[in-house]
Image (cartoon, coloured by chain):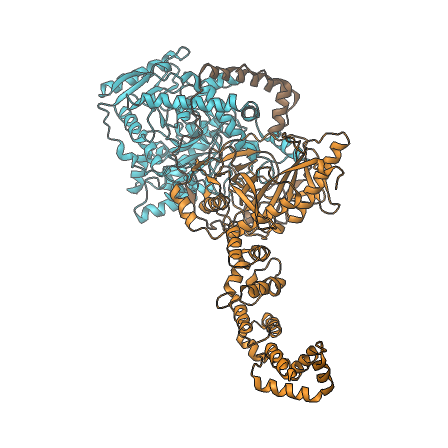
Chain colours: A brown, B orange, C cyan
């Protein structure tokens, strides 16, 4: 696989996906940083991994499951205690635009 | 209906999401109870506080397996949870835990009953597990977020694009809902949002193999809307094509007031879900033993029950109505023991009982117990009461909740079958109407009804009509 | 012992004295608090000092000790990396985005320590969201190295390491995702363990990279670390990835015997660019092991040089999703905004530091459409190769020993210009997280500037007993003499 050339548009696109507002200076800096990092990680292409399975986890196999029971106390007040803005028991956010 | 509709074939696939009937949420021990105050059913896990982790509810797995078996799917012995990332205020983690490439159920099908008793098969692609998001309520200048629904378990049932009309789509959703209710997977309360549909619709000229461009209609929550929205969209797409345009791939919402589909305002930021395997959950392992255990405990499915009813003598239509809800079919069967005539019972349930059903209430809450209806119909069968008397009794039973026997007794509805008093009444009538008797005997058969009516009146409506009929015939014959 | 010296006790010593009623927990806690007051304004190891809560816990601990049968950690003051949720106390993760977040619940490991009667003396500084190797990425200032205030304490658990080294507390909790316990332990001359992945619950520990993060203790001796680990380890129904294996009594494993222990020495780990004094100290330690009856074997971990690349794709990808919840809606910093999209963008722009943003960007990119296979998936495949390297190596040895870092503590600001330079200092520790293995850093010497040097011990999965035994044997052998920092 050929090296990825990262562009300013790509930086802006990724920033949008990650919901990060970046200043022009930050964008330039990240363009350089990401370019450098991607160039570095390209060394992984030296390895032939065609028939190698990916490791998504290193824990033990088997899915622990819980019993279907209500174990959480109902405490909306505690859950809202750190909310920057709450109203009538809801978390309040500025208008959601589609 | 669009012009040139016949030239085109509509291709429709449905994605049905339904809440599973569990006491607690998918990944935490919060209650799933509907209708509580905002954020009453929350904890650090479903509010996505820093450092929390998901733990899977075992009942969710069992229900998903039931649904998979009911839909004739292949149950994956090994499936993976994935993170689906996007930002929205009702999605507290900023990602939804779902299943992407390796779902718990694959393939499968649902057979829809057709009018002539056959069935039409709609194939499924897959069924997978995922958690629901919370709810946003829009206010003036702000939105309010309630996370009670965040983390409630869902299955998503994806069909192949085998559906061809809006009506068929509605029938599919109906059958799916019935199946899910039969196996206690879901309560199917569409008005409460526990079952909703996304429809993918495209059209292509008849005979063409390639699919046309599809649009998606999201969040339909009634059969009527499913049918109407799809039909509208089919026409709209045909009109676009016929006037030389191209259908664009968009997401639409159904406006039930104006009865049109509207494109959702295009999102400023496109969604790249960036799926990757959920590192906080090991792969889901489903042992064959578990699947077998669940298979042996599966209740009879609607299609099988319908087939059985038809075999036992009901029409396809009657079977369809009675099996539309499991509790109706159960009620019908609970009323049957001791009765010789299923048809009467079927009829009774379909008319007298179903008429009293209230939305949101169970049958048990709205009508007399099935065995009491059975007792009532037995009395009719044994000619102890007339059908009319039964209706009167039933109405009283609905009000006062008493047994059939007590009600019939209280209202004195037992009918007289003794010939003695009936003969006496008939003799009196014949004696008092010599002119009419003569006319009848001369050939005016229509007068028979008059005589019978008089006899019924004289008996205070309590005489067995059949007995009156037979005796009257004899007596009038002379 | 002078009251002012109580903070210099080991956990084992203090525990014995507490049980003999020679000292009280309150005295012990006070000694630590006094030490913190004296040195922390310079060191900046603590973001929050829990004076009131600690005193209350100490009083309660004394009551329990008096009643008899109190656990070993009862009354012991510990520093807690500010990444653990501690109920009722601020947990910031060294980030502005959580500057005023008060935890409504305890992490499982915190609850376990609380149940044992431990005293939480304060929340220790770290690199923001555990992303870093020097604690310079903290939004609240770097933690300095007690051995030289112009140098870093290491990271990301720099506060915890420095606090233990400076005797501000008797032990501490850290987390390790790519070396964040072992590297600061090495820089600060203390013992630090990263257990096998899944040995200790992660519930309530603010997540950086879910398949790499692990909880572990810092202490001044291997025995002390074993005592803390014994309480931390074990199954947790709140963590689906936590192992149900029974927890051995790690303290009992410290038999002092390493005869016949086969030590693997990977040839790829003795590279150019490593400080000569570091290599010297590590080789001297290996010689000491030989004299104790262990044998040395050269082994190969051929994919070592690919570990950093794989790590920085996997960790950042997982982090990009783990940090998506910081949006100003339910807790934390919120920026003023007219609509919800601006809310997200402004809050996260203002709340996250530069390194965090950098990693979120890289991780988001690695998962995005068109790049997933080439980056994230590729990295996970290389991860498999690295795991296999270790599996093969452990067929021929019981423990692998390496340096912890290529250098001793570097100067503040020295590596901040170029992120890649900083990342490369993780070179010896990162593979261990990728493979999910247990790793421990023990001090084995000092360089010419009196800066500590650490030796890394790596074992197969769930072999904590072996590496603890090995570390303890070395410590007891007298080859290494601990020097207190000047501060």
Q: Position of residue A80 (x, y in %)?
A: 57, 45
Q: How many marks?
A: 0
Q: Nearer the viewer, residue C337 or C372?
A: C372
Q: Classify residue C214 by image quadrant.
A: top left
Q: Position of residue B443 (x, y in %)?
A: 71, 78
Q: Is residue C475 visible?
A: yes
- Quadrant of the image for the C terminus of chain C? top left
Q: Position of residue C427 (x, y in %)?
A: 42, 18
Q: Residue furthest front?
A: B442
Q: Residue furthest top?
A: C272
Q: Position of residue B346 (x, y in %)?
A: 57, 62
Q: Is residue C339 visible?
A: no
Tell me if residue C459 comes above or below residue B131 in the rendering: above
Q: Nearer the viewer, residue B355 or C121?
A: B355
Q: Nearer the viewer, residue C9 or B153?
A: B153
**Horizontal relation, residue C205 to residue B178: left or right:** left
Q: Residue furthest right?
A: B243
- Quadrant of the image for the N terminus of chain C? top left
Tell me if residue C117 comes above or below residue B348 in the rendering: above
Q: Classify residue C179 by image quadrant.
A: top left
């Amino acid at each position: 696989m050929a090296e990825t050339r990262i562009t300013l548009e790509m930086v802006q696109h990724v920033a949008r996906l990650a919901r990060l507002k970046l200043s022009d200076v930050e964008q330039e800096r990240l363009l350089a940083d990401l370019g450098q990092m991607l160039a570095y990680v390209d060394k992984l292409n030296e390895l032939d991994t065609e028939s190698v399975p990916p490791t998504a986890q290193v824990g033990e196999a088997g899915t622990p499951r819980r019993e279907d029971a209500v174990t959480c106390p109902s405490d909306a007040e505690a859950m809202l205690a750190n909310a920057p803005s709450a109203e009538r028991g809801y978390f309040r956010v500025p208008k959601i635009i589609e | 209906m669009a012009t040139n509709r016949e030239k085109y074939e509509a291709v429709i696939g449905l994605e049905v999401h339904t809440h599973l009937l569990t006491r607690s949420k998918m990944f935490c021990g919060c209650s799933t109870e509907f209708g509580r105050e905002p954020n009453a059913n929350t904890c650090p896990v479903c509010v996505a506080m820093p450092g929390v982790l998901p733990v899977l509810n075992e009942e969710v797995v069992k229900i998903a397996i039931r649904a998979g078996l009911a839909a004739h799917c292949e149950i994956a012995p090994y499936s993976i949870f994935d993170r689906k990332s996007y930002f929205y205020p009702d999605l507290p983690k900023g990602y939804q835990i779902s299943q992407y490439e390796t779902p718990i159920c694959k393939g499968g099908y649902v057979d829809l009953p057709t009018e002539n008793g056959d069935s039409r098969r709609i194939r499924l692609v897959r069924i997978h597990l995922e958690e629901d998001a919370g709810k946003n309520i829009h206010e003036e200048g702000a939105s309010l977020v309630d996370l009670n629904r965040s983390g409630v378990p869902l299955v998503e049932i994806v069909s192949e694009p085998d559906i061809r009309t809006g009506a068929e789509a509605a029938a599919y959703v109906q059958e799916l809902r019935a199946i899910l209710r039969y196996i206690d997977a879901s309560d199917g309360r569409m008005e409460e949002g526990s079952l909703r549909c996304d429809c993918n619709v495209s059209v292509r000229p008849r005979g063409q193999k390639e699919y046309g461009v599809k649009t998606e209609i999201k969040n339909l929550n009634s059969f009527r809307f499913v049918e109407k929205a799809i039909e509208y969209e089919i026409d709209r797409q045909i009109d676009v094509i016929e006037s030389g345009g191209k259908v664009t791939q968009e997401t639409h919402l159904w406006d039930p007031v104006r009865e049109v589909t509207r494109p959702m305002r295009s999102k400023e930021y496109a969604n790249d879900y960036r799926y990757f395997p959920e590192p906080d959950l090991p792969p889901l392992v489903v042992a064959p033993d578990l699947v077998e255990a669940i298979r042996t405990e599966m209740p009879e499915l609607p299609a099988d029950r319908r087939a059985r009813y038809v075999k036992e003598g009901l029409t396809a239509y009657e079977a369809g109505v009675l099996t539309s809800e499991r509790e109706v079919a159960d009620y019908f069967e609970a009323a049957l023991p001791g009765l010789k005539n299923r048809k009467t019972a079927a009829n009774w349930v379909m008319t007298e009982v179903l008429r009293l059903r209230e939305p949101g209430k169970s049958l048990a809450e709205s009508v007399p117990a099935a065995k009491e209806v059975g007792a009532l119909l037995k009395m009719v069968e044994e000619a102890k009461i007339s059908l009319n008397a039964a209706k009167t009794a039933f109405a009283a039973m609905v009000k006062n909740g008493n047994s059939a026997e007590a009600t019939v007794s209280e209202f004195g509805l037992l009918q007289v079958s003794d010939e003695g008093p009936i003969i006496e009444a008939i003799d009196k009538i014949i004696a008092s109407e010599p002119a009419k008797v003569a006319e009848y005997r001369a050939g005016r058969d229509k007068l028979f009804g008059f005589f019978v009516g008089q006899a019924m009146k004289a008996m205070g409506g309590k005489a067995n009509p059949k007995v009156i009929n037979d005796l009257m015939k004899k007596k009038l014959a002379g | 012992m002078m009251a002012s010296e109580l903070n210099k006790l080991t956990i084992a010593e203090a525990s014995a004295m507490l049980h003999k009623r020679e000292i009280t927990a309150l005295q012990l806690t006070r000694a630590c608090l006094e030490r913190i007051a004296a040195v922390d304004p310079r060191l900046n190891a603590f973001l929050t000092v829990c004076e009131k809560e600690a005193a209350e816990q100490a009083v309660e601990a004394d009551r329990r000790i008096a009643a008899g049968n109190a656990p070993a950690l009862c009354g012991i003051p510990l520093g807690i990396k500010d990444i653990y949720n501690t109920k009722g106390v601020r947990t910031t993760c060294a980030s502005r985005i959580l500057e005023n977040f008060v935890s409504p619940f305890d992490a499982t490991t915190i609850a376990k320590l609380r149940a044992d009667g431990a005293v939480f003396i304060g929340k220790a500084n770290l690199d923001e969201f555990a992303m870093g190797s020097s604690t310079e990425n903290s939004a609240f200032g770097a933690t300095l190295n007690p051995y030289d205030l112009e140098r870093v304490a290491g990271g990301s658990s720099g506060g915890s390491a420095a606090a233990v080294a400076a005797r501000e507390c008797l032990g501490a909790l850290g987390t390790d995702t790519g070396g964040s316990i072992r590297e600061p332990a090495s820089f600060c001359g203390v013992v630090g363990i990263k257990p096998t992945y899944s040995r200790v619950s992660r519930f309530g520990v603010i997540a950086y990279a879910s398949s790499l993060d692990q909880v572990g203790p810092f202490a001044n001796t291997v025995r002390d670390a074993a005592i803390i680990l014994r309480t931390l380890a074990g199954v947790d129904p709140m963590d689906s990835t936590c192992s149900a294996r029974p927890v051995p009594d790690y303290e009992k494993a410290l038999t002092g015997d390493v005869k016949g222990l086969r030590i693997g020495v990977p040839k790829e780990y003795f590279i150019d660019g490593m400080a000569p004094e570091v290599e010297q100290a590590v080789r001297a330690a290996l010689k000491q092991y030989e004299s104790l009856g262990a044998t040395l074997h050269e082994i190969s971990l051929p994919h070592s040089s690919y570990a950093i690349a794989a790590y920085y794709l996997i960790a950042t990808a997982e982090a990009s999703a783990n940090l998506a919840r910081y949006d100003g809606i339910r807790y934390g910093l919120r920026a003023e905004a007219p609509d919800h999209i601006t809310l997200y963008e402004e809050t996260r722009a203002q709340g996250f530091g530069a390194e965090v943003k950098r990693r979120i960007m890289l991780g988001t990119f690695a998962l995005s459409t068109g790049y997933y296979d080439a980056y994230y998936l590729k990295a996970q495949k290389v991860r498999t190769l690295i795991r296999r390297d270790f599996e093969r190596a452990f067929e021929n040895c019981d423990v692998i020993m390496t340096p912890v870092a290529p250098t001793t503590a570097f100067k503040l600001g020295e590596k901040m210009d170029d992120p890649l330079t900083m990342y490369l200092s993780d070179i010896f520790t990162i593979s261990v997280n990728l493979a999910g293995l247990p790793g421990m850093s023990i001090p084995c010497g000092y360089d010419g500037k009196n800066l500590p040097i650490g030796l890394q011990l790596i074992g197969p999965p769930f072999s904590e007993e072996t590496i603890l035994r090995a570390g303890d044997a070395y410590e007891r052998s007298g080859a290494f003499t601990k020097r207190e920092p000047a501060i």
